[in-house]
Amino acid sequence: MLNSYARAYNSLNISATSGTLIKAHPKSFMKSYQINSVFEKELNDVKPMIRVRGNLKECVVIQTMVVGNDWLMSEVVCLEDYLNGGEVND
């Protein structure tokens, strides 16, 4: 009785993605990119940056989701638009 033991095998395999990204800011946009790309390193840094019309700007990543093998999708908004509360001036 005291010489018995239990052996447990745990195997985790995620082969499907699920979930929904819903736009949460009026001036945000969705961007898909590969993990370990230059874009990913700029976007997921301590001070996130994004290239808009050739200029590098500070941004805020609102949400990110894994969408496939080595691919991510993020909702991104420029920092100045985020700080202004998303007021749309058209």
Image: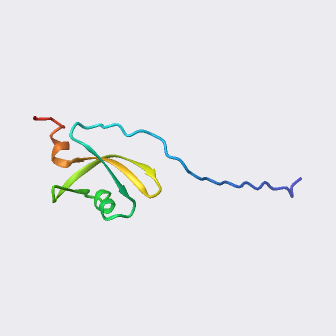
The outermost residue toward the right is 1
Q: In this view, does 57 lie above or below 87?
A: below
List x then y, in percent, for residue 34. Answer: 38, 59
The residue depicted at 31 percent of the width and 37 percent of the height is: 23
List x then y, in percent, for residue 26. Answer: 22, 36
Query: Relative to 69, is 56 on the left or the right?
Result: left
Q: Which quadrant is the C terminus positioned in?
A: top left
Where residue 42 sits, quadrant-wise, is bottom left
Where residue 2 sits, quadrant-wise, is bottom right
Q: In this view, does 86 lie above or below 10?
A: above
List x then y, in percent, for residue 64. Answer: 37, 48
The residue depicted at 29 percent of the width and 37 percent of the height is: 24
The residue depicted at 25 percent of the width and 38 percent of the height is: 25
Colour logic: rainbow
Query: Relative to 9, is 38 on the left or the right?
Result: left
| Total count of labels | 0
Query: Relative to 71, is 39 on the left or the right?
Result: left
List x then y, in percent, for residue 85. Answer: 18, 37
Depth check: give the residue in front, 46 or 17. Answer: 17
The residue depicted at 56 percent of the width and 51 percent of the height is: 14
